[in-house]
Image (cartoon, rainbow, N blue to C red):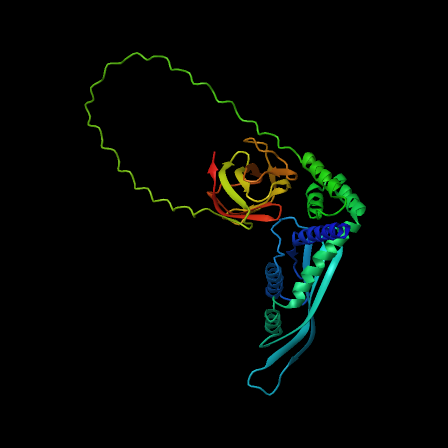
Amino acid sequence: MKKSIALLTLLFVVSLSVAAQETIHFVAGVPAQKGLNQKNKDALKLKVEQILARNNAGVASLYNAFVIQPELVLGETRKTEGLLRDVTLVTGEFSLTARNKYDDSVYGTAVIEVQGDATGSTDDAIASLISSIKVTDPAFVRFIRNTRKHITEFYQQNCPIIIEKARVMIDAGMLREAGAYLSVVPETVPCYGDILKMLQEIGQQEPQETPVATEPTPELVSPEPVAEVPPVAVSEPVPAPAPVAAQPEQTPLPEYKAAVSCNNLTFELVSCEGNETAGTIRMHVRFRNTGATNNNAAIRMGLAIDPDGATFTEIMQVAEKGCTTSTYGNKMPKGIRIGKVFEIKGVNSPCAILSYAEMAVDNCKVILHNIPVNWK
């Protein structure tokens, strides 16, 4: 009987560890080595994103700490001779390195040999080499699995160091960075209770929004009665009113769209109002958690882009319409809508719509397109 209990306990602990590993996600980094044109750098990053998606390891959070950094080390390059067209042959090594962008810890690497060829330039051959990388390669599956395991072990063994580094970030005023650094700590680590307390502390230290003073509305005063004046006969004919030019029809706005990356989260846009005097846009939204109750959700808005291409990243949460300003430690009971008001600052010219916006609830990303703005 004691052996059975011990076995069940061991299986329970292992299942918790595996579940924690499955919640660890990554973002694709941009290759930093020289010798690659921008097109091939973008292709390498896209290849990493495809590998992460294939292994359900792509992150939805805007501030995740774990980055998969790709690198392509070129080997021999040669051209064939004596053919109708010169063919460039390129070999090299494609490597992936998993690291923490806040403390530069390295959790795992993977290296595979690759080769490509193309008629024409070396850049074309490199592009062929990148396209030959198979995202289904078992080496990438092992890399993701082992990296998640190493990350879990790292956090279990380094709780005091993690808390100390986060404390330094908080004292330096790097609240968002500290929150992101702590929010990826697996729930199975011994110091997870201390991590939650620090996240709550970060939420309490976030700057509160000062309400914008508005001019008082003047009271309406009834006008003094005016004595009636007898009508005066008009001898000259009254000219006919000038014809009014037809107003051009307004182009209809694009249709608003929202996409949510997780099946257990729904999104609702309540309002989006602009204040031309303050140069701000306030967006009132609601999220509904349809999965298990979450008592420590991190809710953020990362950026917004207008039709002219202006990108806004100075975004605060506002205590309005009963919504709190907490980024971390938000309670999301199952099936209950949670409201947030985000204020976008630095909007210098009114726009009929916001072309794009990003929000996140923990690892669930919400992408918005063509959000209509009502200016006041």
| 167 left or right, relative to 180 | right
Residue that extends furthest to the front in the rendered view of this protein: 1
The front one of 213 and 337 is: 337
Q: Position of residue 348 (x, y in %)?
A: 54, 40
Q: Where is residue 131 in the image (x, y as percent from the top left)?
A: 59, 69
Residue drawn at (34%, 12%) of the image: 225
Number of marks in the rendered image: 0
Q: Position of residue 342 (x, y in %)?
A: 57, 38
The front one of 270 and 122 is: 270
Where on the picture, by quarter, is residue 314?
top right
Residue drawn at (43%, 47%) of the image: 255
The front one of 370 and 150 is: 150
Where on the picture, by quarter, is residue 332?
top right
Is there any visible trace of residue 255 in the rendered image? yes
Position of 174 relative to 106 (above/below): above
| 352 left or right, relative to 363 | left
Q: Position of residue 179 (x, y in %)?
A: 69, 43
| 323 left or right, relative to 111 | left
Is there any visible trace of residue 312 in the rendered image? no
Position of 10 relative to 112 (above/below): above
The front one of 72 and 121 is: 72
Position of 301 relative to 238 (above/below): below
